Image (cartoon, grey):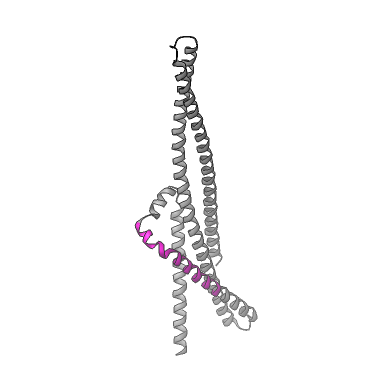
């Protein structure tokens, strides 16, 4: 009866760590897809705004925290197993107890494997959440920059129009000063010139403000891009490290 219970416990542990390994592979696949260069951040934001994700939004934070707790518990359990079998292996003499030493070495290898699987799963779960947040922020910043660029172009066109009108009015005033315009027309032209000059000043102020906002949005976009590239580099380094660990094992 005791061996049967041990076999069932071993099977449950194997199924448990198999599920964690599958979860790790799914995380790697999702992160690879998120890092594809030909899919823009705005396209991802459109996908994230689909109706199915809106329905899952109330459960997303709870599910995220639940997975963190589960992975932390599994990681601590794997750490405990590694320490347990490391100490037991050091207390045994491989020459006097070769079979026991091999068995403990196998247990230690499994514990280390479980430690890597749970640790990488926890790390990639946090990285995936951060990358999705950065993609949404980058898409929002890109859309805001596009709107500001359109506003700046419209302001520039209006400013050029006002400047041309101002030049025409200056010429008209100059001609009126030499007696080519009828009496009383100069006052109306001066008022119109003053109004257009004031509108030009307001347009220039609006242009400067729009340029400042555009520069701020560009800096924010650059910072988000740098943060996204840094996380991508960490993810690549993690993949290389994971490959090296599997080769060592």
Magenta residue check for 169: no
Point out the image quarter for the C terminus. bottom right
Instruction: Compare residues 165 and 153 and report the one nearer the observer.
Output: 165
Task: Tell me if I can see residue 39 in this picture.
Answer: no
Magenta residue check for 75: yes
What type of secondary structure mainly makes up the magenta span? helix
Describe residue 103's horizontal placement relative to residue 91 as left or right: left
Please count the marks in the image. Answer: 0
- Residue 59 location, x and y as percent? 41, 65
Name the residue at 52% across, 38% down.
209
Describe residue 82's horizontal placement relative to residue 35 as left or right: right
- Residue 1 location, x and y as percent? 44, 90
Instruction: Compare residues 17 and 3 and report the one nearer the observer.
Output: 17
Name the residue at 49% across, 63% down.
125
Q: Please, is residue 40 above or below residue 163 in the view?
A: below
- Residue 190 location, x and y as percent? 48, 20
Instruction: Compare residues 109 and 61 and report the one nearer the observer.
Output: 61
Residue farthest front in this picture: 184
Name the residue at 50% across, 70% down.
69
Task: Tell me if I can see residue 202 in this picture.
Answer: yes
> Which residues are drawn in magenta?
51-77
- Residue 189 location, x and y as percent? 45, 19
Q: Please, is residue 70 above or below residue 9 in the view?
A: above
């Amino acid at each position: 009866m005791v061996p049967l219970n041990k076999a069932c416990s071993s099977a449950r542990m194997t199924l448990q760590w198999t599920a964690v390994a599958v979860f790790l592979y799914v995380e790697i696949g999702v992160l690879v897809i998120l890092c594809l260069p030909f899919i823009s951040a705005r396209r991802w934001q459109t996908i994230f705004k689909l109706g199915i994700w809106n329905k899952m939004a109330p459960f997303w934070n709870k599910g995220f925290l639940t997975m963190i707790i589960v992975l932390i518990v599994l990681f601590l359990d794997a750490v405990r197993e590694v320490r347990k079998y490391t100490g037991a292996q050091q207390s045994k003499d491989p020459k006097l107890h070769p079979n026991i030493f091999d068995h403990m070495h196998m247990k230690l290898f499994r514990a280390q494997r479980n430690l890597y699987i749970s640790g990488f799963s926890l790390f990639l779960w946090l990285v995936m959440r951060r990358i999705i947040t950065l993609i949404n922020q980058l898409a929002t910043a890109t859309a805001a920059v596009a709107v500001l660029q359109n506003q700046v172009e419209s302001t520039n066109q209006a400013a050029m129009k006002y400047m041309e009108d101002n030049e025409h009015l200056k010429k008209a005033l100059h001609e009126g000063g030499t007696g080519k315009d009828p009496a009383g027309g100069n006052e109306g032209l001066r008022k119109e010139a003053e109004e257009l000059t004031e509108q030009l000043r307001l347009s220039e102020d609006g242009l400067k403000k729009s340029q400042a906002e555009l520069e701020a949005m560009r800096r924010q976009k650059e910072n988000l891009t740098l943060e996204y590239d840094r996380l991508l580099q960490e993810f690549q380094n993690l993949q290389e490290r994971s490959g090296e660990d599997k080769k060592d094992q």
